[in-house]
Every structure is written in C-alpha cells, then in structure tokens.
Image (spheres, helix red, strand yellow):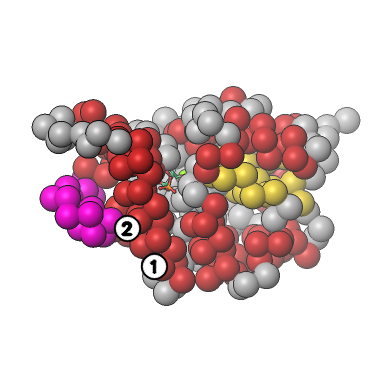
Amino acid sequence: MANELQALIFDVDGTLADTERDGHRVAFNAAFVAAKLDWVWSEALYGELLAVTGGKERIRFYLEKFNTEFEKPAQFDKFIAALHASKTRHFVAMMQRGEIPLRPGVERLIKEARAANMRLAISTTTTPANVEALISSTLGSDAMQWFEVIAAGDIVPAKKPAPDIYDYALEKMGLQANQCIAFEDSLNGMLSSQAAKLKTIITVNGYTSEDDFSGAVVVLDQMGEPGAPCKVLQGNAEVTYLDLAAVKKLFQA
Ligand code: XBP
Ligand code: MG
C-alpha cells in the first residue's frame, strides 16, 4: 500500500512569496549603496544571477562573471559577509514593513494543513532571519512554530540544487522522502528536492516560468484560490486550486 502523506515541505523564496525581484534584489542594491559600491542589479541581470543560490554565493558569482574589473579587498570573505549581513538587514526591514505578501493560496493551504494535523517544514537557501521576518509579518508572530523544522541558509554547506537541505529537514522530522511532498518554484529548488527523492509540486514565477520542470508532479502558475483558479502548465492533473485534498491526490498519483 502506498504511503500516507505525513508532511508538506515548503521552499520560501518564489514559492511562499515573490521575494526575489522586489525583495532580495532591492535589498542587495540597498546594501551596495550603503557600502558605496556602484553596483546595480537590474531585474534582467538578477534573473541571470539567480542561477546561483545563496546571497553570498550570488555576490561572488556576480564578481566572477559580470564585474571582473572590481578589485577585491584584502579580506574578501569578510567583505562579502559584511555586505551580505547589510543586505539581510535591509531585507528583514522590508518584510517587517509588510512589503511582500504571500502568493495566492499559500496562507489558505498552510492553515488547512495545520488544521488537519499535517506536519509542516521549511527548506530554503535563504538566511533564517529572512524566513522569520517573512513568516511572522504575513502569518503572525506565532507562525514560526507551525513549522517543526526550519531548514535554512548555511545550516548545510551545499545549498540547492544539492539535496542536503531537504535531507536535513527529513532527518530532523524523522520521515522518509516517500512520506512527504515538496513545494518549489525554481529549477535549482526542484533539482534539490528531487535529489532528496521528494515528489514536488511547482508554482512558477516570472523568473522561473521557462525552467524545465520535467519530473515535477505538476507545474502550476500559482496555488490559486476558490473563485480564482490556478492554471495547470504541465502535468496530467485537474487542479482548480491547491487544497489539501488536491495535494494528497497529486502525492498518490
Ligand atoms: C532563494 C535563494 C536565496 C535568496 C537570497 O532560496 O537562493 O539565496 O535569493 O537569500 P529559496 P540570502 O528559493 O531556496 O528559498 O541572501 O539570504 O541567501
Ligand atoms: Mg525558491
């Protein structure tokens, strides 16, 4: 008999909220201004930089590929860490001001799952402070406790697309991959969840709609709401909006 679904594991950036273009990118640029650097990450450039997950790693990638003229300071690791810490402060402040809402259906699904005693976890590349700021500002100050594991940031050295952050979440929950389902928005995210052997539901966003999501359980434009249906972009499923019954059906299919 097939396993029963025990837990939902959510990615954060791009999945819970559209944070990349108007959140992280803006916070990076604010940190560059504060550090008196003349770097500007446009929406288009940021799309290319998203090939690399992790903010510190993304800054290094930018300097390796797009700004090779920049003379690296002597203590380069410290420079990157300080710049990224400043970016995190800007991002947290933006979330605390409520600048980025959750994507359609996210709050509804999480609350339904919670009411049904479904176990919940987070698996993300972003810094823990960012997760806390987003979740508390959108779902309320106690909402961090709804998730039994917050697997985030540098907790594992190898970030997505490596499976490590999902493996970590599964290990902490004491669950097998075939008892859980993952929610992702990007190719790097899905490669990570699939490498951890998790079935994965994709909701795309502006930066990821052209990614190749072969192997996903279903690809949707968003989770949708009653009266505001989602579109099925890939996969043989009839979903009008993602509720727990739909998730369970996709998990069993
Ligand atoms: C997205 C990421 C992160 C964020 C920036 O993670 O790759 O690096 O873009 O956050 P996910 P930091 O989709 O797994 O949530 O600057 O804190 O890394
Ligand atoms: Mg993501």
Q: Residue at x 74, y 46 (%)?
A: 7
Residue 199: % across, % down = 64, 34
Q: Earlier in the sequence, mark 1 or mark 2?
A: 2
Mark 1 close to ligand 1, CB under 8 Å: no
In the rendered image, is residue 20 in sight? no
Q: Which label was assigned to residue 27?
A: 2
Residue 105: % across, % down = 56, 62
**For the residues marked 1 and 2, what is the alpha-carbon distance in whole angstroms?**
8 Å
Residue 118: % across, % down = 78, 54
Residue at mark 1:
94
Give left or right: position of 84 versus 46.
right
Q: Residue at x 48, y 47 (%)?
A: 126
* Count of numbered circles in the view: 2
- Magenta residues (range): 30-44
In depth, the one of 109 and 36 nearer the eye is 36
Q: Contact (CB < 8 A) between labels 1 and 2?
A: yes
Q: Furthest-right residue in view?
A: 1
User: Is residue 28 depicted above or below 155 in this figure?
Assistant: below
**Is 132 included in the stretch rendered in magenta?**
no
Amino acid at the residue labelled 2: Ala
Mark 2 close to ligand 1, CB under 8 Å: yes
Residue 235: % across, % down = 54, 36
Q: Quadrant of the C terminus?
A: top right
